[in-house]
Amino acid sequence: MIPRFFAQYFAQCRPLVGLLALLSMVALPLHAQSLTIKADAPERYLVQTGDTLWDLANRFLNEPWLWPQLWHENPQIIDPDKIYPGDELRLIFDDKGTARLQVEGEGGVVKLSPGMRVSGLRQAIPPIPQQKIDAFIESHQVFSPEELAASAYVVGAEDDRLVVGTGNLVYVRGLTSVQLGSRYLIYRSQQEYKTTSQQKNSTQWLGVEMQYIGAAQLESFQAAEGIAAMRVLQAREEIRNNDILTLNDKGNTPATFYPQAPSRQIKAEIVSIMGGMSYGGKNSVIALSAGKLQRLVPGNILKIEQQRIPVKDEHTQENLVLPTEVTGTVMVFRTFKQISYALVLEASKPITVGDWLISPE
């Protein structure tokens, strides 16, 4: 049986945001990892309103991203993507000591059958707190320095308007291709992402966070001056000079998330806690200093590692760096060239800019 419970569609054909979808035709490295049950995992758990599938996985497993293995070839489970508040999960072990889960719903143990499961008006629990990342998938992205330098930009508006909104004309320079009727997305620069290399004592510019402002359609183009006239189709805010226009979304948000460790060892830095926060915790969205160049993909799981404050050994007068602490887990949900967005799935301590993110062991 194919575990399908982590494939969830956004409304109106937005990307799938299922956390642990696992298709049988896709070979994933997580199958090779060992599944271990938490020492304090409950024998039974009653699913509550507000639970997510990640929450349930974290109750039972030391490695929650290996959740599909708990359902693998389990004849007691039908449609694991349909777990509802009020269902009871029961942890059992087969003759070989392999852990399995049973779901006991309104009609007792849910067994595999050709019939339909009648759920009435009950709503299945989501894979993750989807509303926490919706805004960032829809309205935030990151341009690399090269992409920003090559982007088209607004230079003015009809009738020298100071306030430009839906229905108005804006004038744009810097288009690299011209096709009348094309629809462009309008973004505004928000925050520069940089990291400082302690070894080289230098700063690396990773990209610029861009916020979606609106959309416009190309109506005409004057080749001599390289100026395009565009009609604003949508405006969340007034359009300003120097706002950026692009044909394509720069981010990578695939149809399905596959929870897995990164394909290579990662050590990245938290460069921003979204929303301008100084500290973050569970369900915070963060930006980290690794992306497509480091082969990160949506669904990658990373551990949060916090540096300890240096101490002085009073006996030897040596300055010591204490071991780091692993204080949480994040899941990457959107990747750009050198920056990714991730959702904090768990955090035992407040997280802050400068904390490290590492591959799980």
Image (spheres, helix red, strand yellow):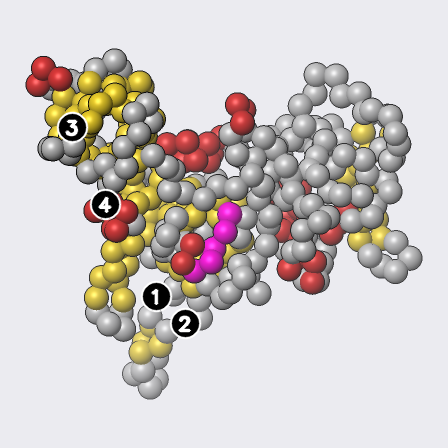
The kind of secondary structure the magenta stretch mainly shows is: loop
Closer to the chain start, of discs 1 and 3, is 3
Q: Nearer the viewer, residue 158 or 286?
A: 158
Residue 150, label in figure: 4
Q: Amino acid at mark 2?
A: Leu
Seen in the image, is 286 located left or right of residue 39?
left
Query: Distance of mark 1 from mark 3, alpha carbons?
Result: 60 Å
Residue under label 3: 222
Q: Range of the magenta residues?
A: 294-298
Where does the C terminus fall, quadrant-wise? bottom right
Can you give x and y, in whole percent of width and height, for residue 257 in the image? 57, 44
Examine the structure image and report whether residue 297 is included in the region drawn in magenta: yes
Can you give x and y, in whole percent of width and height, for residue 33 in the image? 68, 62
Label 2 environment density (alpha carbons within 10 Å; few <14, some 14–19, many ≥20): few
Seen in the image, is 315 located left or right of residue 31?
left
Label 4 environment density (alpha carbons within 10 Å; few <14, some 14–19, many ≥20): few
Closer to the chain start, of discs 4 and 1, is 4
Instruction: Describe the element under mark 2 as helix, strand or loop.
Output: loop
Query: Do residues under tags 2 and 1 come within 8 Å of each other at their CB atoms?
Result: yes
Residue under label 2: 322
Whether residue 237 is visible here, answered yes or no, is no
Residue under label 1: 309
Where does the N terminus fall, quadrant-wise? top right
Q: Is residue 191 above or below residue 215?
A: below
